[in-house]
Amino acid sequence: MTRFLRYFLLFMAFSTAVGAVAQVFSDDVRQRTIRVGVMLPLHNINGDGKRMVEYYRGILMACDSLKQSGISVDVHAWNAAEDCDISQLLRDKDAARCDIIFGPLYSKQMQAMSDFVERNDIRLVIPFSINAPQLLTNRNIFQIWQSPTRITTLSIELYLENFKDYHPVFIDCNDSTSRKYPFTSGLRRQLDNRGIAYNITNLKSSEESFSKAFSRTKKNIVILNTGRSQELGVAFAKISGLKHNVPTLEISMFGYSEWLAYTHSHLDNFYKFDTYIPSVFHYNPLTSSTQRLEQKYRWNFHSEMQHALPRFALTGFDHAFFFLKGLHKYGKSFNGAAGLFGYPPVQTPLVFERMGNGGLQNHSLLLVHYAPEHRVETVKFK
């Protein structure tokens, strides 16, 4: 027997608000209740299940928010655990009635899911990192996760667009485990092609040699070849010493998304050195929208969100709000392109592009800026 979970089993607080909606049958999803499916591992057995339960709760919070603006949603959820037979879940009559399904989490479930949504004209949102070659042939699929290669390419484009007037300084941090070579080498290659001069130095260089790498007439932007916290701390100390000796130097930092997890130990230096970090998300606990959702989560689920980056509940909220509002406004022609409606994401921006004749892939990237005035802003969306 399929383990079918009606959403109110996990979300009693919203059971009357979202579930008790009169069904209005119509072929046009813009004129009726949106039927949502969630096929993810929804259990407390391991980390996958606990993270997906939190993500699912975020979806439910988005449904409740949308209800306040007159958008009706009917949610069905299935526990698509790693060892389950996904084809059994797909036999449930309610699955074929969905307009959109969020899932799966495991690559081995993708082929059956892809065939199912194509056959029934259902939109499938793949929220996390799995191997999904079906994206290239199935127009009903939206893939949110972006590969490291894709993020590297976008980060280089982002740098070249915003910092072409800066003097780049690459610092070798002597980290043999670093995986940042594709970015630093790719960026240097693009700088060479554009005739933009840059300097390379080392954390172990003498003060005199280190100082010579920095321009006295242009703004400098520092790029490390590691994302680790320890080397970042050493770099900040080295740069602080340089600024003490040459106060007129203008220095900014261009970092990596891993740095967002280091704010507890490096935040002052992020501000001091005008730090820019490309990322596919930005969790800011100080914004009113984040605080409101975190409070709502505590009220309804009597627990705190897991201390993960990004926050899974906020991710689920952003995903569901984006797609359900899109379906309500544009129907099944919704393609997630930029500028379709004004939704300011709480944490995770989404912008989709069609992959040839296949599905749609998220290509969003933002630039998190820690300004010297102790202000955090996102200054660029891709």
Image: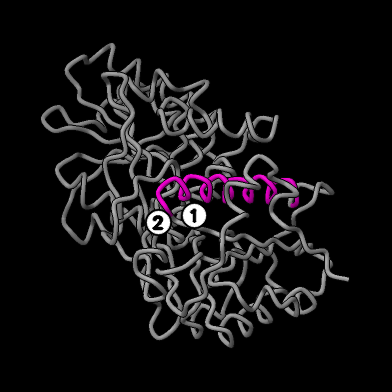
Q: Tags 1 and 2 in contact by the CB under 8 Å rule?
A: yes
On the rendered structure, is 220 left or right of 18? left
Mark closest to the chain's N terminus, 1 or 2: 1
Query: Is residue 203 depicted above or below 349 in this figure?
Result: above
Query: Is residue 181 depicted above or below 239 in this figure?
Result: below
Which residue occupies 74% across, 76% down?
Answer: 92
Residue 44 at x, y percent in the picture: 81, 46
On the rendered structure, is 363 left or right of 283? left
Residue 119 at x, y percent in the picture: 58, 88
Chief secondary structure of the magenta portion: helix
Identified by mark 2, the residue type is: Leu
Which residue is identified by label 2? 350
On the rendered structure, is 45 left or right of 39? right
Distance (Cα) linking label 1 and label 2: 8 Å
Judging from the image, the colouring scheme is one colour
Q: Which residues are magenta?
A: 49-70
Which residue occupies 57% across, 44% down?
Answer: 176
Residue 319, label in figure: 1
Identified by mark 1, the residue type is: His
Residue 92, label in figure: none
Mark 2 lies on a secondary structure that is loop
Report which quarter residue 84 is drawn in.
bottom right
Residue 61 included in the magenta stretch of the image:
yes
Which residue occupies 39% across, 39% down?
Answer: 255
Residue 349 at x, y percent in the picture: 40, 51
Q: Nearer the viewer, residue 144 or 125?
A: 125
Residue 138 included in the magenta stretch of the image:
no
Query: Is residue 254 depicted above or below 205 in this figure?
Result: below
Query: Is residue 55 depicted above or below 137 in this figure?
Result: above
Q: Nearer the viewer, mark 1 or mark 2?
A: 1
On the rendered structure, is 22 left or right of 208? right
